[in-house]
Amino acid sequence: MAAAAADSGRWFAALSLGVSLLKCLFISAYHSTDFEVHRNWLAITHSLPVSRWYHENTSEWTLDYPPLFAWFELGLSHVARHFDRNMLLVENLNYAGPSTVLFQRLSVVFTDLVFVFAARECCRCVQEQKGSRDVLTRPPFVLAVLLLGNFGLLIVDHVHFQYNGFLFGFLLLSVAKHLQSRHLQGALLFSILLNLKHIYLYVAPAYGVYLLRSYCFTQDNTDGSVRWRSFSPLRLVALGSIVASVCALSFGPFIMMGQLPQVLSRLFPFKRGLCHAYWAPNIWALYNVLDKALATLGVRLKLLEETQLPRASMTGGLVQEFQHSLLPSVSPAVTLVCTLLAILPAVASIWWRPRGARGFLRCLLLCALGSFMFGWHVHEKAILLAILPLSILAVESREDAGIFLVLTTTGHYSLFPLLFTPAELPIKVVLMLIYTVYSFTALKNLHSSRGSVLRPLEVVYLLGLVAVAFACEVIFPLSPWQQKLPFLPLLTTSVYCSVGVFYSFLRLYVSLLRPEEKPKQP
Amino acid sequence: MQTWSLVSICVLLGVVVRWGVSLNSYSGAARPPMFGDYEAQRHWQEVTYNLPLQEWYFNTTDNDLNYWGLDYPPLTAYHSWICAFIANKINPEWVELHTSRGYESPAHKLFMRATVLVADLLIYIPAVVLYCFYLTDGSAKKKVSTLFCFLLYPGLILIDFGHFQYNGVSHGFALWGVVALGLGWDVFGSMAFCLALNYKQMELYHALPFFCYLLGKCVKLGLMGRGLACTLLAVLPSSIRLLTKPTFWQFKLALANSSLAFFLFSYQVHEKSILLAALPVCLLLNDLPLMAIWFLQASTFSMLPLFLKDGLLVPYVVTSLAFLFFSIYLLSALEHCTEEQLRLGAYHKLFFCLPKMDLACVLRWKFYISIAVMAGLSVASVALVPPPHLPDLFPVLVSATAFTHFLGTFIYFNIVQFSGPPARKNQKKNN
């Protein structure tokens, strides 16, 4: 590539355009029920009055995102009108004509522009190394590729079908604003995000504590502790009013109609089971396996009667409530307590020993991973909440790059069951290969001067992941166990990936709680 | 970053783009009684697997030549047999004699698309990688850029993975031939080209340059000097020039000129045959980027009516935009176009009567206008309805526009072939 093109900074536009065009090639690919979910929401918001939005249940896919997202769907529906009016009829369940598919897919590609803009802002925040001229080896370029070409986003948004790019754009933009010390803008963006999809409540503690400690208290004592006198009520009021006004804009109409309880019950449906249909690789997956293993062992050793055990079949792949056989059953309250305990040290750490915006980012990651590990009914897609912000740290520090590689590879592999159709198999394998080859070689190249990125044990673990993948996708379908134990590949994948995710969680904790070292030489 | 990782990423991107296009429709989908090229290939699998060799090319009760009779040389037939063998293992209904006519199913489509990808991966893509790495000049990054743009050429992707054909096999063998001749392995090169010819007889478009290059190398310079009278056949000047100067540069240009000549002046030429001219022009992506990109885009555009019929509008738009943008960006096509680099010196000599102009600037403007015209006609073909007394207005306009482009390119490459050799030091400066 000519030096002229690189220096003029056109590489970012080229990269964005290339990735967007690639996304357009998946228009005809398989899409999941989420496609129908969003079509239904387009129909509901377009055809029904606001008072009916959260009561409507003609379709099983009821509106369960906060009101701001409903307004967003309303906006989209006005464009959808010009493509195919039939998709906006509520009774047209599972309607998926060619124009509908084209519109929905293109809407995801276009709303991804928010993500592209956010990625550009993040690239600007990244610290540059001295003396590297070649564009391909500079941290902003590597970060841009890791974000824009993220495997998880590509297959979840543009094949499976969702609007995560749009939402993560707000999150990353908010993080970028905090890194640039524009805290009010960051708070505004996060409030908007919370009102678009409430799953981001997982990382709200990090925001709350960080803004309170590092923004509302304008100065620290020399030893780093809180200077109580420097509290600025004005700043607190500013933050509070931003959050309140966004929530008012979003929930206001529903509060005035007295529908708040109904909306909240839609947003927080705790009737769903401990684990999602495909087990996210978290602690509860390990807990389930342990329970099953102990139960089977107990029966084999004649310590238990088989008839005494409740018919637990969490492995059936359905989303219902289940009882554990041997170990105590887990309720939503228990998971909440576990999650809070898991993130408490991180949140406390940025209060007692604030480490600036990057410490906040680390705390955010720990909140995300903590709630992934211990939360109730976690989707495996939630791993992206940790992977994407971690990319920023990965291009700056060798240690974070190592954590990133382990977390990303296991996290992305755990997304494989989302695309189970044979026609999409080459797409997921090839895209995974591209991303893995790039992330490993680019990060290794970036940090080559400071030693190796991965520890030997991590290399062994990742090679083991390849073996597990090969066994599950190739060997298992041809083996005799295919009939007897059909859930075995999913179970093995979940368990093996849980180990990797938990390991990354612990390593990130160590990096946050460790006493701060002297500033590194650039 | 290490070159091997960049190369593997380029190849993987090429594969994912190909597979993405595969997800769309194919020629003749759900259109009985004749269907299209997809059904033709499936039918050949049926014929070659179930009937003995002696009946493959003959009209018998079991083999009706009017229904997609086998009209490619035996290597295609053997390839069909191999595919049929595998097809039969998966689902015998796919190649059942007579009863499998018009068979269509998602699983079968997956199988057929997979056969095209496997053939591409085994034959075409390795040849492209070798060509870009051993026979182009420049830094490693420039070679990787050339590789990426070569693999991104939309025409071949849309025809093989959209419409449905196996041009990757014949083009791949021909490219192996070119690579071998470029590396000096003449015997291997000849074998490879013979394989190409035995796969599709249209490779005859490329036969004269291969012949003249090898013959010229055998007899060496001196036997036929300059000043030989040009005959009426358009291809003779190029071939004879190659005979007198059998260098690899002349060989590449002769391939382009020969296939263009055959395309422009032959009898009963199918629009897909432009791919035979596109392959040699891909070889020139590194040397004459702007003209090569211009021609390659025009060649894709010329097949627009076919793509519209096959339901491949979205892949056409996506791959054309991607190819145009990335080739201009990565190969810096619009920056490296001084008159010397575009080798327009000869035009000055030809049009000596005209006032002195900056021909490079004129050429760039012609390029912009041409892209605008092609884009405009593409949009019009989709969005507008032709007037009732001119139902074929848009295909005719597309053909006419494409023809002017091809003719212009033919003249240009001929002039370049007759000008001096490329200045090596120019190319070194640009890295």
Image: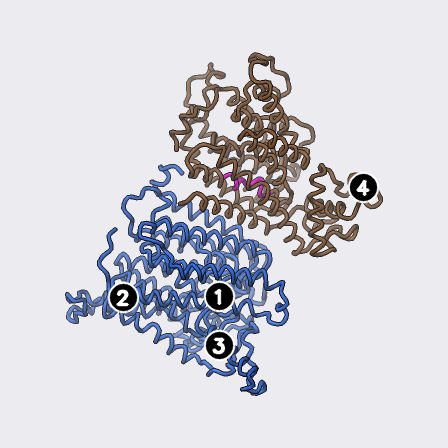
Chain colours: A blue, B brown
Disc 2 is placed on an element classified as: loop
Instruction: State the image quarter where residue A367 is shown.
Output: bottom left
Residue drawn at the location 62% of the way across and 50% of the way down = B114
Q: Which residue is mark 3?
A: A290
Q: Residue at x 75, y 42 (%)?
A: B68
Taking A312 as reference, is A4 left or right? left
Distance CA(mark 4)–CA(mark 2): 79 Å
| Span of residues in magenta | B149-158
Which numbered tag is attached to residue A514? 2
**From mark 1 to mark 4, how far is it between C-alphas?**
64 Å
Q: Residues within 10 Å of mark 1 (few under 14, many from 20)?
A: many
Q: Is residue B91 left or right of residue A214?
A: right
Q: Position of residue B278 (x, y in %)?
A: 57, 34
In the rendering, which numbered label is found on residue B55? 4
Residue A102 colored magenta?
no
In the image, A451: left or right of A473? left
Which kind of residue does numbered mark 1 sit on?
A: Thr
Cα separation, mark 1 vs mark 2, equals: 50 Å
Q: Amino acid at mark 3?
A: Leu
| Label 4 vs label 3, nearer the camera | 3
Secondary structure beneath dot 3 equals: helix
Query: Can you identify the residue that label 1 sits on?
Result: A45
Q: Amino acid at mark 2?
A: Arg
B43 vs A409, nearest the viewer: A409
Q: How many marks?
A: 4
Q: Secondary structure at mark 1?
A: helix
- First-in-chain label (2 vs 3): 3
The nearer-to-camera label among 3 and 1 is: 3
Q: Which part of the image, by quadrant, shows the N terminus of chain A?
A: top left
Q: Is residue B151 magenta?
A: yes
Question: Dot 3, how many residues are within 10 Å of its Cα: few (below 14), some (14-19), or many (20+)?
Answer: some
